[in-house]
Each structure stands twice: as structure tokens, then as C-alpha cells.
Image: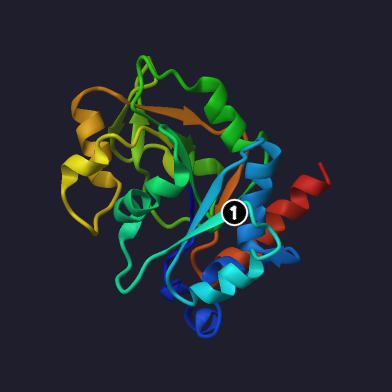
Amino acid sequence: MLFAAGRGTRMGALTADRPKPLLPVAGRPLIDHALALADAAGIARIVVNTHYLGDQIEAHLAGRPAILISHETPALLDTGGGLGQALPLLASDPVFTLNSDAVWTGPNPLIRLAEAWDPERMDGLVLLVPRAAAHGHLGAGDFILDDEGRVRRGKGAIYTGAQIIKTGGLAAIGEAVFSLNLLWDRMLAGGRLYGLLHEGEWCDVGHPGGIAEAEALLARARHV
């Protein structure tokens, strides 16, 4: 599940006439950076949710008929509602979810998650990055890892927008519009939400300055 439905309001004028996933970073749209990760991980079924200027995203992806579109209308459904609407198209449980507004260096995050996933212990596995390796991100941190890899909320590592998650608990929430934080809270209460640290760097491209930071990060990686 590739999240691409947000309005991108922090981008200001840059998203006045195009959705954030189509903003260029290092010569290609943001969404193509995310799709390259999915392709390299061998993921065959990809669902992209859309809302604001979604027709532009759908047109951009028209050359890839295997990618399915889950258009959210009239309301934006947030991450939990958006994933819930997309479930019939995903036809899988658990699923990867990935935000479309970030760039990465280091190992493929989806491959790393797949290698660490243990469905016997986990209902969710979130990929985190230490604050020192996070760029363009203004938050103080999201999760603290214990010695066994379980997470609790706190000003520790930053959630990157990549995870593997079981979707069975979505129906029990009983709302159309909600954040995946609600599902995480239930997993946290049961000790079933785990975390994994990314072995590279990550840049949140959520505001105009994040574009330059992302391009600088990718340029440094090319010259290492």
C-alpha cells in the first residue's frame, strides 16, 4: 500500500497545481522513488491511494497497469481509513505500507522489513531511523525500542513511513476516517508492535526545504 492521497499543504505553492507525490526530487517524481523500492523488493501487487489531484497520479501511473488505484472521495480517509478502503484491492494480510514522500539511502527498507518479519510474535513491524540519520523531519521522535525489539511511544527513533502490518484489526475500529495510530495503540497494548532500525539515512520530503535536503542526501550517497 503506497500512501499518496495527502493534500501536501506544507508544500505551499508547489502543490497548488500538482499533488505532492509528483513533485520532482533528483530528476524524478517522489512517487517513483517509492515505487523503485517496491520494484526492487519484488512486490507484485501495489495499491496507490489518491485524493487531491488524484487524476494526475493516475495518469502518471497509466503505463503500469498492474498498479491499482484506490481513490478516496469525497473525504480524505487518513492512513487507517485509506488502508481499510484499499483492502479488497490488496487481497493480502499482512501488507507493506509505505509513504510516498521520503527518500532513502542504505538497504532497501521493504526487504529489511520482510527479512525481520515474524508473524508469530508481531502484528506490526515499523521501520525506524535514529534522529541523527533523519533529515527534513521536525519531530522529536516516535518510538523507543526495548531489548527484544518491541516499541513504546516516546522521543526516540523516528517512524519512516514504512512498515508491515496485519490488517485484521481495522474492521473493529468502526470508523471511516482514522489514523493507523489507533491500530498501533491496540498492538502496543498487547505487546505486538515491534520496530526495526534502518541501516542508512532517510529524508522526509514534507515541506519545500525537504526537497533540497533529499537531493543533497542522494548526491552524497552516489559519491560514497
Whether residue 36 sits left or right of residue 190 in the image: it is right
Return the residue nearer the eye: 174 or 212. 174
Whether residue 3 sits left or right of residue 148 in the image: it is right
**Residue 107, position in %: x, y?**
66, 33
The residue at the point 61 percent across, 42 percent down is 201
**Residue 163, position in %: x, y?**
45, 37
Q: Check disc 1: other Cα within 10 Å, few if <14, some if 14-19, many if 20+.
A: some
Return the residue nearer the eye: 125 or 96. 96
User: Is there any visible trace of residue 120 in the rendered image?
Assistant: yes
For mark 1, give the secondary structure: strand
The amino acid on which the numbered mark 1 sits, given as a three-letter code, is Ile
The residue at the point 59 percent across, 36 percent down is 109
Is the image coloured rainbow, by chain, by secondary structure, or in one colour? rainbow
**Residue 69, position in %: x, y?**
50, 60
Please identify the quarter of the rendering in which residue 65 is found. bottom right
User: Is there any visible trace of residue 160 in the rendered image?
Assistant: no
* For residue 27, above or below residue 178: below
Please identify the quarter of the rendering in which residue 144 is found. top left
Quarter of the figure that contains the C terminus: top right
Question: How many numbered discs sit on the rendered protein?
Answer: 1
For label 1, the residue is: 67
* For residue 140, above or below residue 128: below
The residue at the point 53 percent across, 59 percent down is 101
Return the residue nearer the eye: 38 or 181. 38
Whether residue 56 sits left or right of residue 25 in the image: it is left
Whether residue 167 sits left or right of residue 100 in the image: it is left
* For residue 122, above or below residue 85: above
**Residue 115, position in %: x, y?**
56, 22
The residue at the point 30 percent across, 54 percent down is 81
Residue at the right extreme of this rendering: 223
